[in-house]
């Protein structure tokens, strides 16, 4: 399931960003729409997922988050997205390690 793979990869992205010091440990990642999915089957399955991501410091989003990751739908709060950074920029995530 592509959504499950995307969740795993976003969690790994956050963990790596925190461990490398490029993201604060208490930042919340906002997960938007999956824009595109490419699947390659060779000696297993490999996914390249393009998804809209952002980072926020909104307390409402932090409260709705699970493991510091929240859906954009759960973080919208009456269309006020002023402190959600870069959600409009799709990011391509590649995963080759998640068994499906």
Image (cartoon, rainbow, N blue to C red):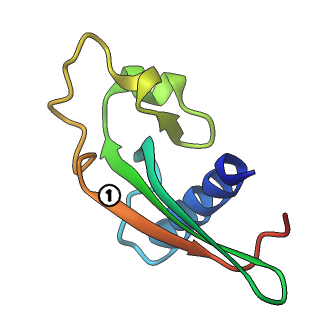
The structure residue drawn at horizontal position 83% and vertical position 81%, both measured from the top left corner, is 44
Q: Nearer the viewer, residue 2 or 20?
A: 2
Residue 76: give x, y in percent of width and height: 33, 21
Q: Work out which residue is located at the far top of the displayed protein and give it.
A: 78
The structure residue drawn at horizontal position 19% and vertical position 20%, both measured from the top left corner, is 80
The structure residue drawn at horizontal position 55% and vertical position 57%, both measured from the top left corner, is 10
Residue placed under numbered mark 1 in the picture = 90
The structure residue drawn at horizontal position 32% and vertical position 58%, both measured from the top left corner, is 90
Q: Nearer the viewer, residue 25 or 97?
A: 97
Considering only vertical position in the picture, is 47 above or below 8? below
Left or right placement of residue 61 versus residue 79 in this view? right
Left or right placement of residue 9 versus residue 26 in this view? right
Left or right placement of residue 38 versus residue 87 in this view? right
Residue 98: give x, y in percent of width and height: 77, 70
Disc 1 crowd, CA 10 A, few/some/many (<14, 14-19, 20+):
some
Considering only vertical position in the picture, is 51 above or below 31? below
Considering only vertical position in the picture, is 24 above or below 46? above
Badge 1 marks a residue whose secondary structure is strand
């Amino acid at each position: 399931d592509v959504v499950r793979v995307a969740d795993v990869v976003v969690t790994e992205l956050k963990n790596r960003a925190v461990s490398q010091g490029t993201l604060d440990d208490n930042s919340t990642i906002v997960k938007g729409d999956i824009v595109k999915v490419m699947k390659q089957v060779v000696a297993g399955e490999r996914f390249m997922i393009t998804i809209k991501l952002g980072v926020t410091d909104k307390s409402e989003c932090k409260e709705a988050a699970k493991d510091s990751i929240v859906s954009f739908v759960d973080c919208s709060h009456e269309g006020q997205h002023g402190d959600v950074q870069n959600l409009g920029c799709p990011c391509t995530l590649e995963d080759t390690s998640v068994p499906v």
